[in-house]
Image (cartoon, rainbow, N blue to C red):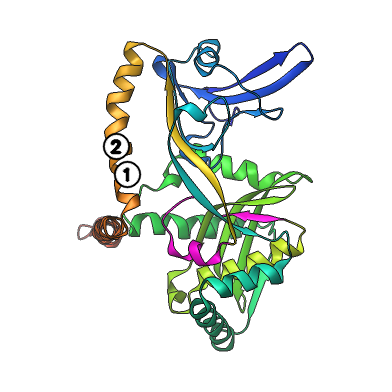
Amino acid sequence: MDRLRDRVRVAVIQDETGIAGFFPYERHSFGIGKPLGGFLTTCHGLISVPDLRLEAKALLRACKLSVFDFDHLVAGQPTFAPYESDVRPAPVMDFTQGFDAWLQQVKTNSPKNLKTVRYKERKFGREQGGLRFEWASADPEVLRTLLAWKSDQYRRTGRVDRFAQPWIVELIDLMFAENSADFSGVLTMLYAGDVPVAGHFGLRTATTLVGWFPAYDTEFARYSPGIVHHLQMAEAAAAAGLHMVDMGKGGKEYKDWLKSGVLYVAEGRVSRPSASAAVHWMGRTPFNKARTIVMDRPSLYRAADRVLKGFGRVRSSLHQESSNAVVKEPTGAR
C-alpha cells in the first residue's frame, strides 16, 4: 500500500520491554484516519501482544488524527471496544476438523442447496467438456479474465467499479506477485473443458484464505458456476493445509449455508474534539445508520438490491449502445 498511496502510516507502540504493537492506518486531509486500504480491507485494528490496552484518544493524538473511522475492526480489541457501535458476524468455512467435517456442516445447514449444486456440478461437467479446478494459478491473463468478470458484475448490479481506479488494479498485481509461506495472493479458477468459467482472487496467510474478488462468466449462469467454484475452492484450500476461508461480512445468502463458523468485526469511530471531527460525524453518521437499517431487514436489503440491479441494467444498456455506435465516414473521405 505504501508504494501506491502517500497516506500510509504505521504507528509503532513500545513499552519497557521493546515493541508491543503496531497500528497501521491512512491519514487523510484534516486528520481523518481510515484503515489501511480503505474499503478493500476486511479486517483491521491493532497488531499487538495479547490484550494490549491503550487510551484510544491518546493513540489518535500521537498519530496526528482527529478521527479514526472503522468498519471491519477485529471485534473486542480492548483499545477500541468502547467505541464499537455495531458488531457483525463474518461467516467462515472452518476446516480445522477436516474437509469432510466442513462438508457435513454444509449439508446440515441446507441439504437441499447442497444436493442442487452437486446436481448442477455434474450436469455442468457432462454438458461442457468436464470440469477442472486450478489452485494458485500464476497466469496473469487468467487474472485479467477474472477482473473483467468482476467489473461487469459491478456494472450489472449498480455498484461502483472498483477496478476503474488504477491503484487498486496495481495493488492486486502486487499481491498476485507475492508468494511466501505466510502471505501470498491466490488466484483460483474453475474450467469447463479449456474455458474459464468462475474464479476468485484472495489473500492467503499461513492458515487462512481471505475472500476478496469472486466472479464468474454469466454465459454459464444456469449451472451456478460461482457456488460450484466455491465448493471446489474449499476442498483445495483444505488440501493445501489452510484452516479457514474467511468469506467476509455481507448479505450474500450462499454464505449462510457454506459457513461452519463466524468471526466478528465491528463498526465505529473514535474522535478527539475538533471542527474536522464534527464535520466528519455529520457526513458519515446518517449514511452508517441507514446502511445498518437496510442490512438488518432482509426485505429492505432485497429491495435495495433490486434498485441497484435495475440501475445497473440501464447503465449496461447505455454502455452497450455507446460501444455499438458507429461514426460513418463521409463519402469520398480518405
Asked whether 165 or 157 is in front, the reply is 157
Horizontally, residue 91 falls left or right of residue 205, namely: left
Residue placed furthest toward the left: 331
Q: Which mark is residue 328?
A: none
Q: Please determine whether, in this image, residue 222 is positioned above or below residue 136.
A: below
Category of crowding for the residue at label 2, using alpha-carbon neighbours closer than 10 angstroms: few (below 14), some (14–19), many (at least 20): few
Q: Residues within 10 Å of mark 1 (few under 14, many from 20)?
A: few
Span highlighted in magenta in the image? 243-259
Answer with the quarter of the image where residue 108 lies.
Answer: bottom right
Residue 246: where, in percent of width, then height? 59, 52
For the residues labelled 1 and 2, say whether their Cβ atoms are less than 8 Å apart: yes
What's the amino acid at mark 1?
Answer: Arg
Residue on which the image places disc 1: 291
SS class, disc 2: helix
Q: Is residue 18 left or right of residue 323?
A: right
Percent coordinates x, y for residue 16 in the rendering? 76, 11
Work out whether residue 193 or residue 198 is closer to the camera in this orientation and state it.
Answer: 198
- Is residue 111 visible in the rendered image? The answer is yes
Decide whether residue 60 is among the magenta residues: no
Which residue is at a point 54% across and 38% down the rendered structure image?
Answer: 75
Mark 1 secondary-structure assignment: helix
The vertical placement of 211 against 86, above or below, is: below
